[in-house]
Every structure is written in C-alpha cells, then in structure tokens.
Image: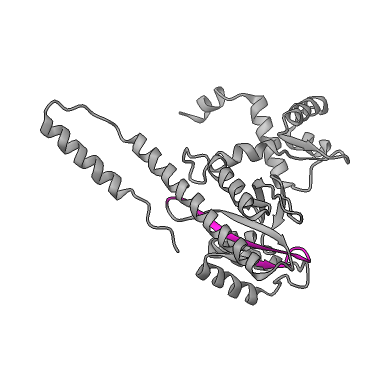
Amino acid sequence: MSEEASQKYRIPVIERMVDVFALLERTPEGATIREVVKAVKLSRTTVYRMLNTLSAHDFVHRSPAGTYTLGRRLLTLAAHVAPNVASYDLLAIAQPHLNQMSDVTGEGGKLTVLSGDEILVVAASQGRGQYALTASAGQRLPIHAGAAGKILLAFSPQEDIDRRLSKLDALTSQTISDPARMLEELALIRERDWARDTGEQMVGVHAFAAPVRDASNAVIAAVSIPFVAGVDERRVEEIHRTVIATARTISKDVAEASKDELAADIPMTAEPSANKHSSAAKRSNAAATKGRVSHIKA
C-alpha cells in the first residue's frame, strides 16, 4: 500500500492520541497540558477533552500538580502481550503462581519487566505474614538496585549493560555503584541464575529474584520476593527456593503456551489414502518434536 493510500485509511484523532502516548513515554516525570498541546498541535480545548477521556479510562493519570503520565490501564494491556508478540498471556500465566508463592511463604511477591532504564511491576501477590511487604502493579524501580532489577540487567544485551553502568546511583550504603563491581555481580547472577538484594534499594529490605524465560530461553521477566531483614536462615532459604521454583514453573508454562500456539498454527489437510494420513502424522510429529523447548537451565 502506498503512503498516500495508507494515510487515507488512518483516523487523525487516534494519530494524535498516539502522539500523546509517545510524549508521555518520553517524559516519565509528567507533561503539562501546555506541553501536550505543543506536541500534538491541537487546540487546548481538544487536548483537554482527549486527556480527560483517557484519564477516565485510566490510560493516563493526572497528578495533583496537573501533570499527566501514562496510566495503569496500560500495564494490563502490556502484560497481555508477549515480548515476541506471541499469543500467550504472561499475566494470566504468572498470577496464579505468584499467588501460590505468597501462600507458601506468607510474603508478597511481584513480576517485573524492563521499562526503559527502569523496571516495571506488572503483577503482584499479597503476603499474609505479619511483616509481609507489599508491591503493586505500576511501580517503577531502579534497575541496578534490587534483586529483580539486577536479574533483568544481567541478561540484557552487553551494549545496554555498558550504557547503564554510568547511572549507578547509590540509594543505600549497600548499593553497588562501582561499574567494575557491578559487572562482577552480573556475571555471578548469570552463573547462578538468581539474584539477591541485601538492602541495596532500601535499608532493612532484602530480596531474592529469578528469571522468567520464554520458549527461546530469553529472559522476559523476573519473579521476586522482598522481605524484612533479620529473619532466620531457614526462612531465608525457604524464600530463596520458592522464588526459583516459581520462576521455573512460570517459564515452563510460557514455553508450553508457545508450543500450543505453534501446534494450533499447523494446517490440517485431509488426504484420501490411509498411507497419506500416516505420512502426514509422522511429519506433524516430527515438526512437534523439532519445536520442543529445550530444558530450562538448572
């Protein structure tokens, strides 16, 4: 389709809405209505009505100061889109396992993904323990300070790691702010396949995290449990084991969902003779065997 034809079948108001989302994506601290008007080149009244409508559906959020940021409704949409645009539903797969993890440990848990130079909580489970820490979808956290962030950083492309090494702000006395030390920490995380936070993001709060992988073994998210420092070592080890087991179970289910989708996409063709049916079945079985997901790294 030519560019002219493509433009003909577009809706201008939706184009402007996309411009609004793009602006707010670039300004996580929030944009004023004046800045939005300038970006989308529409009247202030039109922009106000557009933002008010988006805010009513929680696609954007208006702060008490009058600035606009992306809304939490987008998290729900994003969590239903796999990184490789497959049709499996990451949030639907992960949430029951997060809930079970919290039932077992009594601690709150969360699922996080990369979001620019930060990590974003896209799903959470609430703990029942007296000192359980809570998280909620929509929280943005630093990528370099915290177990989940370090998991996602460790398995990022090297060029992304190198770029982020210049932004290692010290949040506590335990935060790793030295690039050389961080590289050592990331190498250890890749070797272990899990990460620990000993108060790097918040004094008195520790955490364990483990990676969630897709069918190609790429890391797409991190499962973690933050907990109050000072618990006995037996409890610490229970949290550690449960986080790893939960991440592996979610990874397995993601891989299975991908296999199911692949099988559903294989065309079924009727052939007249029994021999042809047998041959088709053999080809189908061979294709399924070839597409099996490799064993998740122990």
Whether 206 is among the magenta residues is yes
- Residue 252: in magenta span: no
- Is residue 4 or residue 171 the one in the foreground? 171
**Taking 227 as reference, is 237 left or right?**
left
Task: Report the residue at 59% width, 75% height from top.
Answer: 184
Q: Does 112 sit above or below residue 259?
A: below
Q: Is residue 34 left or right of residue 95?
A: right
In the rendered image, residue 203, in percent from the top left (x then y), is placed at 78, 66
Residue 200: x and y in percent read: 72, 67
Locate residue 173: give its quadrant: bottom right
Q: What is the total number of numbered labels drawn onto the structure image?
A: 0
Image color mode: one colour
Please state if 256 lies on the left or on the right of 19 as rendered. Answer: left
Q: Nearer the viewer, residue 83 or 26?
A: 83
- In the rendered view, would you say 150 is above or below 85? below
Q: Which residues are magenta?
A: 197-215
Q: Report which quarter residue 64 is drawn in.
A: top right
Q: Residue at x 34, y 50 (%)?
A: 292
